[in-house]
Image: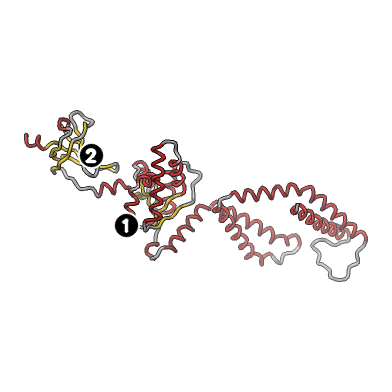
Amino acid sequence: MMVKKIIQIMGVLFGAMAGSEVHGWTSGTTLWSEPSFGVLQRSSSYYMNVALGAVAGLILATMVAGRVIRFLQNGAEQTASLPMKDLLAGAGGLLAGLLLSVLLYPAVSGLGGPAMLAPAAMSLCFGYVGMRIALSKKDELAEAAASLLERKAAPEPEQSSGFEEHKILDTSVIIDGRIADICKTGFIEGTLVIPEFVLEELQHIADSSDLLKRNRGRRGLDILNKIQKELDVRVLIYEGDFEEISEVDSKLVKLAKALHGKVVTNDFNLNKVCELQGVSVLNINDLANAVKPVVLPGEEIIVQVIKDGKEHGQGVAYLDDGTMIVVEGGRDYIGTTMEVLVTSVLQTSAGRMIFAKPKLLEKAL
């Protein structure tokens, strides 16, 4: 009701002003005439025009009050539903446009006639354009602000000299859990970036009806909690999103390009996509393979054959670090511990595979 009364009062005031101007037009003066501050003699027609204008303004304001109130309510609700990032970006763009109009005001302040409305029109136009530009560039502005905050928070200038410090974690490497141990050793430097859309995917997995998926999701959340609270590493929760992209892997690639960072993963397919897109990758499996004991062709090792291989006559054994060894002719030795001779080593991002043959066969030859 208060808003309706305000609209009606404004209608009365503007209607009275319009009635006064109608009287001015009939008497030879206009809205743009220079005002006279002397003693004015008002005729009865003047007050009649003012009264009629006020009544007409009140009626018109009452008719449109409902629509104006609904418009204001809808605008307030839509504004309240916007994310904080959109509100800050829009407010910043609006302020920038208004400041630009203030700077240009002296150039148009001396205009007369209808051009006197130019400052108001200029403020509206520049404010709207600034707001639209800021909203369209909200992701870039958020990234720039986050980078600026990170640079200010860094204790040493050389640590904040570039964006290569950002290590962006994907869902698989968080669930895997080894990233926490690697961070604890100090081999990962810089800032760990955890995108909000990765957190949402982890939450979705943790809420799954499937027991295995639910346990994996909860393990990932526990690992993140450990990294944030127990380890001495900088963690940045990136709240931005790329709404035009549905796939999480594609979002990670785009975020890595925007931040000039590196994707930390153990996903073989994501590793290949990042390489094709020119994005740097830190593959946990590659690191694990790199620190495994080096086994060269011709070396002799002692293993226990535990099962059949895929090919006829093959046996399979494993080293203590989980490396699989395919023993040619080892099927007959399942369940026994034996000495084998390494013939070749196959190294890929998915893991390491060693091919060998029983040493006793070598002696027999």
230 vs 27, left or right, is left
Q: Residue at x 73, y 62 (%)?
A: 116
360 vs 81, left or right, is left
Instruction: Give the image's coloring scheme.
Output: secondary structure
Q: Is residue 42 above or below residue 182?
A: below
Query: How far is mark 2 from mark 1, CA to CA?
Result: 29 Å
Write down the quadrant of residue 185 in the picture: bottom left
273 vs 2, left or right, is left
Residue 215 x/y as whole percent:
39, 41
Residue 356 x/y as whole percent:
16, 38
Residue 10 x/y as whole percent:
78, 56
Mark identifier at residue 324: 2
- For label 1, the residue is 186
Please tell me how crowded label 2 is: few (under 14), some (14-19), or many (20+) other residues with Cα within 10 Å: some
Q: Residue at x 45, y 43 (%)?
A: 201
Q: Is residue 307 above or below residue 346?
A: above
Q: Is residue 76 above or below residue 157?
A: above
Q: Residue at x 48, y 51 (%)?
A: 239
Front one among 114 and 267: 267
Task: Work out which quarter of the rendered image holds the C terminus and state it.
Answer: top left
Q: Earlier in the sequence, mark 2 or mark 1?
A: 1
Label 1 sits on a secondary structure element that is loop
Label 2 sits on a secondary structure element that is strand
Give amino acid for label 2. Met
Query: Mark 1 and mark 2 in contact (Cβ < 8 Å)?
Result: no
Q: Is residue 5 visible?
A: yes
Front one among 34 and 266: 266
Q: Is residue 276 visible?
A: no
12 vs 111, left or right, is right
Residue 240 x/y as whole percent:
49, 50
Please tell me how crowded label 1 is: few (under 14), some (14-19), or many (20+) other residues with Cα within 10 Å: few
Give amino acid for label 1. Gly
